[in-house]
Amino acid sequence: MRRKPATVRIARWSATHPWSAIGLWVVFVALCLLLGGAAGTQRISDAESGVGESGRAGRITASGRFTEKPEENVLITAAGGGRLDTATARKAAAELAGRMRALPEVESVGSALPSPDGTALLLPVTMRGDTEDADTRVQPLLDASAATERAHEGLTIDQIGTGSTAKGLGETLGEDFRKAELISLPLTLLILLVVFGAIIAAGVPVLLALSCVGAAIGLSALASHVLPETSAVSNVILLMGMAVGVDYSLFHLKREREERRKGASHLDAIEIAAETSGHTVVVSGTTVIVSMAGLYLAQEATFASLATGSIIVVAVAVLASLTVLPALLAKLGRWVDRPRVPFLWRLTLRSSSGSRLWPVLLRPALVRPALTLAVSVGALLVLALPALDLRLKQPGSDDLSRDIPVVRAMDRLTAAFPGKGTVHQVAVRAPAERADEVEAALRSLLNRAEDERLFAHDLAPAIRASADRRVHTVAVGTPHSPRSDGARASLALLRAWVPEALAPVRGAEGAVGGKVAQGVDFTGHLKDRMPWVVGFVLLLTFVTMAAIFRSLAVALSAILLNLLSAAASFGVLVAVFQHTWAEGLLDFHSSGAVVSWLPLFLFVVLFGLSMDYHVFVVSRIREAALDGAGVRDAVREGITRSAGVVTGAAIVMVAVFAVFGTLSMVEFKQLGVGLAAAILLDAVVIRIFVLPALMTALGRWNWWPGGLGPASRGRHAARSDADRPPRPPVPVPVGAAAGEHRR
């Protein structure tokens, strides 16, 4: 008698010791949250997040330990955009300046400056401390501005600056995510209620997914002390955790219910589910983790942070489905199907006994596989065509929703005080004894820029030196907007001049940074690293699938189908966000491009999540083939039996991702729409038409080169056990569900 798989042994122990398993899981989640909260989160600094020459310039500047004071700008305009009463505005500015100077958070208040067109007055304020925590200390200043506005009817007083802008955007985004949670949780429960027809069965996956998210957030905080994390990690953990946490529980729970309805005892059904769906969950989780690990090859701190958070939450979700879920099922027993929702319960019974819909949908793929394959693949390629025009850009203020109050205030400030181009930051590090030579070199650089039309000539830039005189910085202005060709041309020219200027200075290291440089370097870095990340994901996924199914054909088809669905989703993303037709529908302003970090992250996530369904469906098809079914029958049985689970899981994922499309930040809108479109295409077009048509057309070549190999126990474990000699009965352990027994 062969040794049972680890998934079965773990599930059996959990099912026969339910309180121990549940207690250990609760302790695990609580410890993760407590330890993570106690350790705190180490955030990625600006210097750590930079890449290329701009990243090097940031690190050089950071090593100089310059004191950066948070600055706030108070804009006074006429309410409703009318004509400004200058005397009233100056009186309000003087009153506000007095209130500001009385605050301990304020270091100095400048003189009120009128706008060029006379429609606004600007009061500059400098805060004490540094910029790191300015958003947590800016509230008294905001209160002073609000009090002054209330005291002067007819004036609008806006505050825009280091702390107030960060606070305003953070609060808006936090409110967005709270709304998303309030929408997504009831929506997920409603979908699962339709899938299971019973309230407890619908609640179990959501409860486990939430516990996985909590544990992963705590573990991510601990991991941040090794790999600092970006502020978006918790959002990605929520997104991924709800998706895979619900999916893995759904796979397991549906299979356990299916086996019980075939006559298996509760404990036998749990074991069979662990051996089949449990194995599939491990494989699916492994493929997602492998895909996300590819982000480390991007060699960029933000991607590494997102990869770490995603890997942690997927691993926790796999652990939960293998350990605590069998314990919950054993403890709940028949109560897992209570209370029943009458109509929905009858619907689930009918679908489990054999739906009439899926055989009809599968008929084209099974009867005319070549034609179905050609039409469906052609349709996906047409959807992918817009991706050929993919344009990338760094996210900026023009990508923010104008519904955000602080963004509207920024627009008013820009209208009253139009910007004059942008600046490049030159940073130089050299031995302290070379400080005079460095300053001379930078002055010659500035003199050279005076004679070049690409640079601004109305500024008098000051050269800053660190306290130890080892680091020097200077801002070189340009009259061109940050995303213009002129700004990029001036950057290229300045980067050519800096090495020439510093050549006589022995031991000097120079670099050019700034907003323009960051965008250029980040996009270029992604283009350089993309082939490595994609190649890694494709290779390891191919090896994983080939090892699991012992078939190169299955592994190759999995790669091709997932590339096809990813390309189609990129096409949808470009069609929606690089054009204006969907602006009113999704409440965004098109910048004519896709956020630069999104394609790489989206590809990795899509590849991992799509493999969930692929592994689950192909596993069911292989089970039927191992049972002796022909190719068409195996495809029909495998997809029909898995269709309900895959459809339910896909609807949950699409619903969760689509909610992210309602957020204010356009980058999260793009992420949500891209993921939702990809999962929808994958679950509908790939699984109903492309996959069955391809496997039917390939026939016995599906399992090349190894064939099906020896029959595995699979879902027929109970049948194999029936052929064994009977064992003496053993007592039912305390806490086991009624009706359970040991074989």
Image: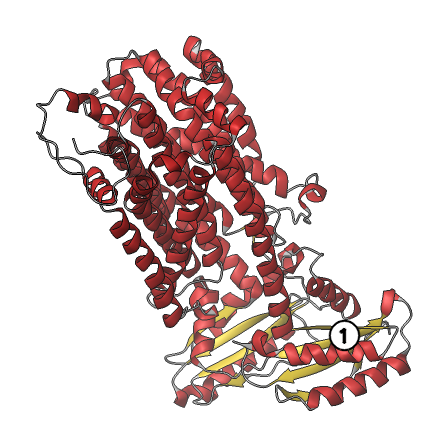
Residue 733 visible:
yes
Comparing 514 with 396, the one in front is 396
Q: Which residue is mark 1?
A: 75
Residue that appears at 75% across and 76% down: 146
Dividing the picture into quadrants, the one containing residue 68 is: bottom right
Where does the image place residue 723, in percent across and percent down from the top left? 13, 20
- Please determine whether, in this image, residue 306 is positioned above or below residue 277: below
Q: How many marks?
A: 1
Residue that appears at 23% across and 46% down: 17
Residue 183 placement, left or right of 91: left
Element assignment for label 1: strand
Comparing 738 with 270, the one in front is 738
Tell me the crowding category of disc 1: few under 14, some 14 to 19, or many 20 or more residues within 10 angstroms, Cα based.
many
User: What kind of colouring is applied to the model shown?
Assistant: secondary structure
The three-letter amino acid code for the residue at tag 1 is Leu
Where does the image place residue 491, in percent across and percent down from the top left? 56, 64
Image quadrant holding the C terminus, namely top left
